[in-house]
Image (spheres, rainbow, N blue to C red):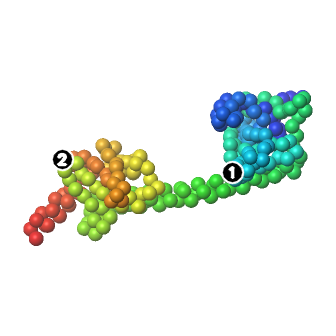
Amino acid sequence: MKYMINSGIYSVNFEGTNNAEFKGVHPALILRSVKNYDMYYVIPLTSYTKERWKNYRKSLCCRIISIGSIARIDKMLILHKDKISKRWFEEEHLLVPTLNEIKTVYNRVLEYISLSMNKSIDEYSKFYSNYETLYCDFTSFITNPTSDMLNLFSINIRDDIIYITYSLTRVTNLSFEDIRRIVWSIIGRENVNVTYDKIKNILIIQIDKNNKKLLTLTEWYDTMNLTEEHK
């Protein structure tokens, strides 16, 4: 018979990819990939104890009673078939859960993935909202600044550096690197420094005054200052 890997419990070489608990060869439940026959979903197993189950059940792990194990769904990986050698056995006996137990684990995997996806969508929605808000606000302020926009931004120029402040609340789901790259996409890849003042709840963006994309903004700023001086 030809060598093949079906669903079930196999010996898997984790090579320390998870953590110390699953370093090296370990029993794991295998899920066959539908399209890529070289890759498998792998769920490591750990021995059941009351203390472990008390902790792991909170992470949507699944107990397999007939073999005294816990399926660590929270540690699921995708591995190449080269990491999977043969069916796992203990004391010369194969480790074979019942069909219903396997179905229960698979259903828990679907639940885990569904909850993870919902959480990811929620987090990405917040990121994307902040991204669109900053991109639109900053583009408008740079290309067509008006006094009304000073409700969102403040601007100050010192030592050939433009300091632009913006509400920190509007970018809570963006990293400094995200913000820097959003600014780059609008003004070009120039020196941009991003910091914040937690007490004042403001984001501070520092840009070289000589940036050509900021010409409209700096001219508007100079005009606004002259107007204020003559009042």
**Residue identifier under label 2:** 159
Q: Residue furthest front?
A: 51
Q: Residue at x 88, y 45 (%)?
A: 66
| Label 1 Cα neighbours within 10 Å, binned few <14 / some 14-19 / many ≥20 | some
Placement of the N terminus among the 4 image quadrants: top right
Q: Residue furthest left?
A: 230
Inter-mark Cα distance, 2 to 1 = 54 Å
The three-letter amino acid code for the residue at tag 1 is Ser
| Label 2 Cα neighbours within 10 Å, binned few <14 / some 14-19 / many ≥20 | few
Mark 2 or mark 1: whose residue is earlier in sequence? 1
**Residue identifier under label 1:** 59
Image x and y of residue 189, in percent: 34, 44
Image x and y of residue 162, in percent: 24, 51
Q: Find residue 191 and report its image quarter.
A: top left
Q: Is residue 167 visible?
A: yes
Q: Find residue 223 and report its image quarter.
A: bottom left
Q: Relative to 89, is 54 on the left or the right?
A: left
Q: Residue at x 32, y 53 (%)?
A: 204
Image x and y of residue 206, in percent: 28, 49
